[in-house]
Image (spheres, helix red, strand yellow):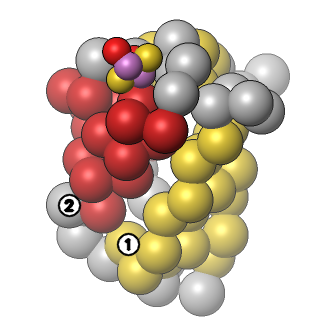
Amino acid sequence: MTTTTYQITGMTCGHCEMSVREEISEIEGVTSVTASSADGTATVESAAPLDLGAVRAAVEEAGYELVDAK
Ligand code: 9UX
Protein backbone atom coordinates (compact mmCIF):
# COMPACT_ATOMS: atom_id res chain seq x y z
CA MET A 1 0.00 0.00 0.00
CA THR A 2 1.25 3.43 -0.98
CA THR A 3 -0.05 6.74 0.35
CA THR A 4 0.79 9.90 -1.54
CA THR A 5 -0.34 13.48 -0.97
CA TYR A 6 -0.62 15.66 -4.06
CA GLN A 7 -0.86 19.43 -4.13
CA ILE A 8 -3.81 20.68 -6.17
CA THR A 9 -4.72 24.25 -6.99
CA GLY A 10 -8.22 25.57 -7.50
CA MET A 11 -10.39 23.65 -5.05
CA THR A 12 -12.54 26.01 -3.02
CA CYS A 13 -15.44 23.98 -1.66
CA GLY A 14 -16.74 20.55 -0.76
CA HIS A 15 -18.03 19.94 -4.26
CA CYS A 16 -14.58 20.59 -5.62
CA GLU A 17 -13.21 17.99 -3.21
CA MET A 18 -15.84 15.49 -4.34
CA SER A 19 -15.05 16.06 -8.02
CA VAL A 20 -11.36 15.44 -7.42
CA ARG A 21 -12.08 12.37 -5.33
CA GLU A 22 -14.38 10.89 -7.97
CA GLU A 23 -11.90 11.34 -10.81
CA ILE A 24 -8.87 10.06 -8.91
CA SER A 25 -10.90 7.11 -7.61
CA GLU A 26 -11.29 5.90 -11.19
CA ILE A 27 -7.55 5.32 -11.59
CA GLU A 28 -6.78 1.61 -11.45
CA GLY A 29 -5.33 0.50 -8.13
CA VAL A 30 -6.66 3.42 -6.08
CA THR A 31 -8.25 2.25 -2.83
CA SER A 32 -9.08 5.55 -1.17
CA VAL A 33 -8.92 9.28 -1.84
CA THR A 34 -9.40 12.22 0.46
CA ALA A 35 -9.25 15.83 -0.69
CA SER A 36 -8.99 19.08 1.25
CA SER A 37 -9.85 22.39 -0.34
CA ALA A 38 -8.51 24.14 2.76
CA ASP A 39 -5.10 22.50 2.39
CA GLY A 40 -5.11 22.28 -1.40
CA THR A 41 -4.27 18.60 -1.27
CA ALA A 42 -5.51 15.17 -2.17
CA THR A 43 -4.21 12.10 -0.37
CA VAL A 44 -4.41 8.87 -2.29
CA GLU A 45 -3.96 5.30 -1.15
CA SER A 46 -3.14 2.76 -3.80
CA ALA A 47 -1.87 -0.78 -4.09
CA ALA A 48 1.18 0.42 -6.03
CA PRO A 49 2.68 3.83 -6.81
CA LEU A 50 0.54 5.70 -9.34
CA ASP A 51 1.64 7.09 -12.66
CA LEU A 52 1.88 10.85 -12.14
CA GLY A 53 0.47 11.49 -15.60
CA ALA A 54 -2.66 9.51 -14.74
CA VAL A 55 -3.13 11.52 -11.56
CA ARG A 56 -2.57 14.76 -13.46
CA ALA A 57 -5.12 13.77 -16.11
CA ALA A 58 -7.70 12.90 -13.45
CA VAL A 59 -7.21 16.19 -11.61
CA GLU A 60 -7.47 18.15 -14.87
CA GLU A 61 -10.58 16.21 -15.85
CA ALA A 62 -12.13 17.37 -12.59
CA GLY A 63 -11.19 20.94 -13.52
CA TYR A 64 -8.19 21.58 -11.26
CA GLU A 65 -4.42 21.61 -11.55
CA LEU A 66 -1.81 19.35 -10.06
CA VAL A 67 1.18 21.19 -8.62
CA ASP A 68 4.37 19.48 -9.70
CA ALA A 69 6.36 17.80 -6.98
CA LYS A 70 9.78 19.38 -6.60
MO1 9UX B 1 -18.67 25.38 -6.03
MO2 9UX B 1 -16.14 24.27 -5.74
O1 9UX B 1 -18.93 26.22 -7.65
O2 9UX B 1 -15.57 24.93 -7.35
S1 9UX B 1 -17.78 23.33 -6.84
S2 9UX B 1 -16.68 26.37 -5.32
46 up-or-down from 26: above or below: below
Residue 24 visible somewhere in the drawing: no
How many other residues sit within 10 Å of disc 1, few (<14), some (14-19) or many (≥20)?
Answer: some
Circles 1 and 2, Cβ within 8 Å, touching? The answer is yes
Q: Quadrant of residue 62?
A: top left
- The residue under label 2 is 26
Residue 33 position in % (x across, y down): 49, 63
Type of residue at label 1? Val
Type of residue at label 2? Glu
Seen from the viewer's position, the closer of residues 14 and 64 is: 14
Residue 3 position in % (x across, y down): 67, 69
Residue 4 position in % (x across, y down): 67, 58
Q: Quadrant of residue 44?
A: bottom right
Question: At 65% across and 42% down in the image, what residue appears?
Answer: 36
- The residue under label 1 is 30
Q: Is mark 1 within 8 Å of ligand 1?
A: no
Seen from the viewer's position, the closer of residues 28 and 9 is: 9
In what element is the residue under mark 2? loop
